[in-house]
Image (cartoon, rainbow, N blue to C red):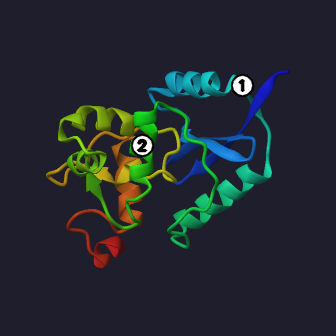
Amino acid sequence: MIKYISVAYYKSPVGELILGDYEGKLCLCDWRYRKMRAAIDKRIQGALGADYQEESTELLDQTKAQLDAYFKQDLQEFDIPLLLLGSDFQKQIWRELLNIPYGTTSNYTALSEAYGDLKAIRAVASANGANAISIIVPCHRVIGSDGSLTGYAGGLPAKKHLLQLENALPGQDQLSLFK
């Protein structure tokens, strides 16, 4: 029997996302045109032994509605069942990302400390970059130790926009949103 991951597209204010639902859990919310698109798709499809099929589902509609609310600043915490697909290490790092609250940032050093190994900083950064559930698993909240914006699958302008939306940029105050 052929298995499918139901996929749909979502046009956010900062770029188009591809959303994936597998058996009622979100396994994909990723930048449609990112550099690692083929590798991410291969990992997800391979892990599930399933192909993509474009179709609407209740979960995908719910995800779009929550993303709409997030971009309108009406939602700070997503309530979507997730299916994290990657190595045990990657999944552990992604779960740590879920602990970074809306409106705050962290850095790779802090994530490495939370993992329990400061020497794992490069592996932590790599796992962060392999996150396939962007925004909901908030990898955009990870910045450089010096406060600089570091790489992001959706591009640095998208990362900056998301952090501004959350009023999470270091040194940003509420008034800067109205300039």
Residue 58 image position (x, y, % from top left): 79, 53
Res. 130 visible in picture = no
Q: Which residue is mark 1?
A: 50
Disc 2 marks a residue whose amino acid type is Gln
Q: CA distance from mark 1 to mark 2?
A: 24 Å
Q: Position of residue 127 (x, y in %)?
A: 38, 35
Residue at 46% over, 30% down: 87
Q: Amino acid at mark 1?
A: Ala
For the C terminus, the image quarter is bottom left
For the residue labelled by badge 2, is the local secondary structure a helix, a strand or a loop?
helix
Indicate the quadrant containing the N terminus: top left, top right, bottom left or bottom right: top right
Q: Disc 1 vs disc 2: Cβ atoms closer than 8 Å?
A: no
61 over 171 or under it: above or below = above
Above-or-below relation of 23 to 77: above
Residue drawn at (53%, 44%) of the image: 133
Q: Residue at x 55, y 24 (%)?
A: 43
Front position in the image: 125 or 61: 125
| Residue furthest right as drawn | 1
Picture quarter containing residue 147? bottom left
Would you identify the image quadrant in which residue 120 lies? Answer: top left
Is residue 110 left or right of 66 when viewed as pictured?
A: left
Is label 1 or label 2 in front?
2
In the displayed structure, 2 sits above or below 138; it is above
Q: In the rendered image, which residue does mark 2 sit on?
A: 92
| Nearer to the camera, 15 or 55 | 55
Percent across and percent down for residue 44 are 59, 29
Q: Secondary structure at mark 1?
A: strand
Tell me which label, 1 or 2, sits earlier in the chain.
1
Left or right, 72 with respect to 179, comes to right
